[in-house]
Image (spheres, rainbow, N blue to C red):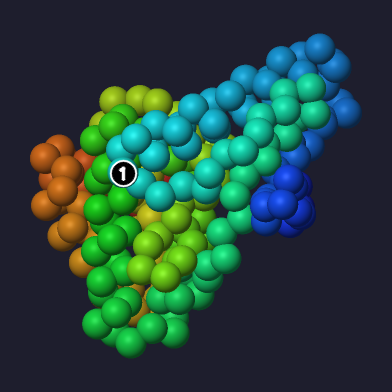
């Protein structure tokens, strides 16, 4: 149960699925809430479909029920990348990190900003990484937004994977090799970090 949605595992038409139910906000006017929920569901579904076209593994969407504020999607039987990176041997962990960099690059090449690009929103299913939860995502070509995406990913590495934070170098290397604009995005990340340090000092 999150602030915006509830996730439930279920069987639906003979398939193992996840029901993603957006939470109704009682403090909002009903018509406004319905409009916002529908817009956010449509945005999330659109981004997932575009990510799939870009060659990124995402859960298959089986049904979208706007009146019920619900998405029915494939249940991925994998492990969170956040957990896997702590357990895998270093060489395998580095391969996973190179995959992460490639995924981030493919998203940004398609002008998709995930909005919560962390290893908690990636599942390791065999040899593939499946990206989940595009609810905070957007379609944008803005360098700043892509920089924020990568800044968030780097911060996640330094906090959740502080014992192996050096592995983030493999993420960056793969990102730049796959995405022609990657070096500019990482330059923007440094600017964002400097602004953050300046704000904290103030």
Res. 185 image quadrant: top left
Disc 1 is placed on an element classified as loop
- Is residue 201 something one can see in this rendering? no
| Residue labelled with disc 1 | 55
Residue 12 screen position, x and y as percent:
74, 47
- Up-down: is 106 above or below 41? below
Identify the residue at horizontal 75%, vertical 40% (top origin): 21
- Is residue 109 something one can see in this rendering? yes
- Up-down: is 23 above or below 27? below
Identify the residue at horizontal 56%, vertical 59% (top origin): 76
Residue 131 screen position, x and y as percent:
45, 51
Is residue 178 or residue 176 the one in the foreground?
178
Whether residue 169 sits left or right of residue 16 in the image: it is left
- Figure disc tally: 1
Residue 102 screen position, x and y as percent:
25, 53
- Up-down: is 124 above or below 65? below
Res. 85 image quadrant: bottom left
Whether residue 39 sits left or right of residue 32 in the image: it is left
Residue 54 screen position, x and y as percent:
31, 38
Is residue 99 or residue 164 the one in the foreground?
99
Identify the residue at horizontal 43%, vertical 41% (top origin): 114
Q: Residue furthest front?
A: 14
Is residue 192 or residue 163 the one in the foreground?
163
Identify the residue at horizontal 31%, vertical 30% (top origin): 111
Whether residue 67 sits left or right of residue 36 in the image: it is right
Q: Residues within 10 Å of mark 1 (few under 14, many from 20)?
A: few
Whether residue 86 sits left or right of residue 143 in the image: it is right
């Amino acid at each position: 149960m999150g602030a915006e949605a509830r996730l439930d595992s279920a069987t639906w038409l003979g398939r193992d699925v996840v029901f993603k139910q957006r939470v109704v906000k009682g403090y909002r006017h009903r018509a406004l809430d319905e409009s916002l929920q529908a817009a956010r569901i449509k945005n999330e579904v659109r981004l997932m479909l575009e990510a799939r076209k870009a060659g990124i593994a995402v859960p298959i969407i089986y049904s979208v029920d706007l009146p019920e504020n619900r998405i029915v999607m494939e249940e991925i039987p994998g492990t969170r990348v956040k957990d896997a990176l702590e357990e895998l041997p270093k060489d395998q962990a580095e391969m996973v990190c190179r995959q992460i960099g490639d995924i981030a690059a493919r998203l940004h090449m398609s002008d998709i900003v995930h909005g919560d690009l962390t290893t908690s929103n990636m599942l390791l299913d065999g040899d593939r990484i499946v990206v989940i939860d595009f609810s905070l995502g957007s379609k944008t070509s803005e360098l700043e937004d892509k920089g924020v995406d990568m800044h968030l990913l780097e911060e996640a590495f330094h906090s959740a994977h502080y014992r192996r934070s050096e592995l983030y170098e493999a993420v960056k290397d793969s990102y730049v090799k796959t995405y022609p604009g990657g070096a500019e995005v990482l330059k923007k990340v440094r600017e964002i970090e400097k602004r953050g340090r300046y704000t904290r000092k103030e």
